[in-house]
Image (cartoon, rainbow, N blue to C red):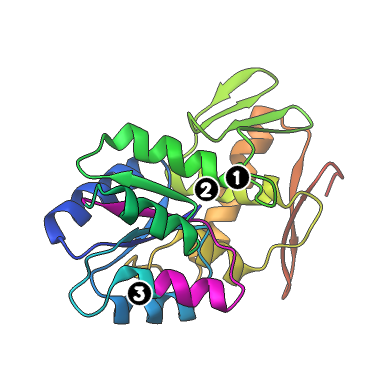
Amino acid sequence: MRVLLIEDNVRLAGFVGLGLDKAGFTVDVMHTAADAQAALGATRYDVVVLDIGLPDVSGLSILTGLRERGDSIPVLVLSARDGIEDRVGALNRGADDYLLKPFAMEELVARLRALLRRPGDSLDSVLVRGNVAFDSTTREVRVGGEPVSLSRRERDALELLLRRFGKVVTKDAIEAAIYAFDDELSSNAIEVLIHRLRKRMMQAGATVHVHTLRGVGYLLSDRVP
C-alpha cells in the first residue's frame, strides 16, 4: 500500500516514514503543499497522512481540494492542534481520521489499516487464495499453513496480485504501488521481482500461479501456466 506523508517537520517526517516503511507501506514524503499537490497529480495513493501546519498553505487546502474533485482517498490528519474546533473542522472538511501529536507509531499504523479496511477499500486483514494466505498486519505469508520467507518487495507484489486476483495488473501499476519516488530501480526490476516471486511460490507448493501476459502485465490465478 502506498502512502503520501505530508509533513513539514523533516525530523518527524523521517521518523514516521521509517515507521511506515517497517510496517510494510511504501512511503513518499513531501514537506510542502505544492510538492504534495504535484505528487497527488503524478500517482495514485492508497492513503494520505496530512499535517495541517505546512509552510506554504494550510494542509486543509489539500484536503478541501481532494474532496471538491470527488476524490475519496482516505486522509488522516496528523496535528498538534488539540482544540475541539480543529478536530471537528478537519472532519467536516472531509478528513477520515484525526490523530494528535505526539503519538505512538503503532497507533498511527493501526489507524491507517483501519481506514483501509472500510467499505469501498480493499485492505482485508487476511487474504486467502487457494492454499496461500497473506496477513496484511503481520506481513506473514503462508502456503499450506507453512510460513514462506519472502523479501519486502516480493511480499508487496504478492499482496497486490492477491488483491486483484484473476485480474491483469500492469507492470506500471506494480511499480507505482510498491516503489517510492526516490527508489532506484533498473528497467527490468519488475520482471526480476515477479520471476523471484513465482519461483518461491512454486517451490513452496502454492496452488495459485503468477502468469505473465507479455506486453500487458501479470495475473494471479488458480490456473496452471
Q: Marks 1 and 2, Cα distance to the nearest angstrom?
A: 5 Å
The answer to which quarter of the image holds residue 142 is top right
What x and y, as percent, mark residue 4?
A: 39, 62
**Tag 2, which secondary structure?**
helix
Earlier in the chain: of badge 3 and badge 1, it is 3
Q: Which residue reaches farthest left?
A: 11
The span picked out in magenta is 62-80
- Quickly name the residue at label 1: 159
Viewer-side residue, 159 vs 58: 58
Q: Nearer the viewer, mark 3 or mark 1?
A: 3
Q: Is residue 55 above or below residue 103?
A: below
**Tag 1, which secondary structure?**
helix
Viewer-side residue, 77 vs 140: 77
Q: Which circle marks residue 156 in the picture?
A: 2
Q: Is residue 72 magenta?
A: yes
Q: Is residue 214 magenta?
A: no
Viewer-side residue, 206 vs 65: 65
- Quickly name the residue at label 3: 36
Q: Which residue reaches farthest front?
A: 85
Q: Which residue reaches farthest right?
A: 223
Inspect the image, locate mark 3, and give the three-letter code of the amino acid beneath it.
Ala
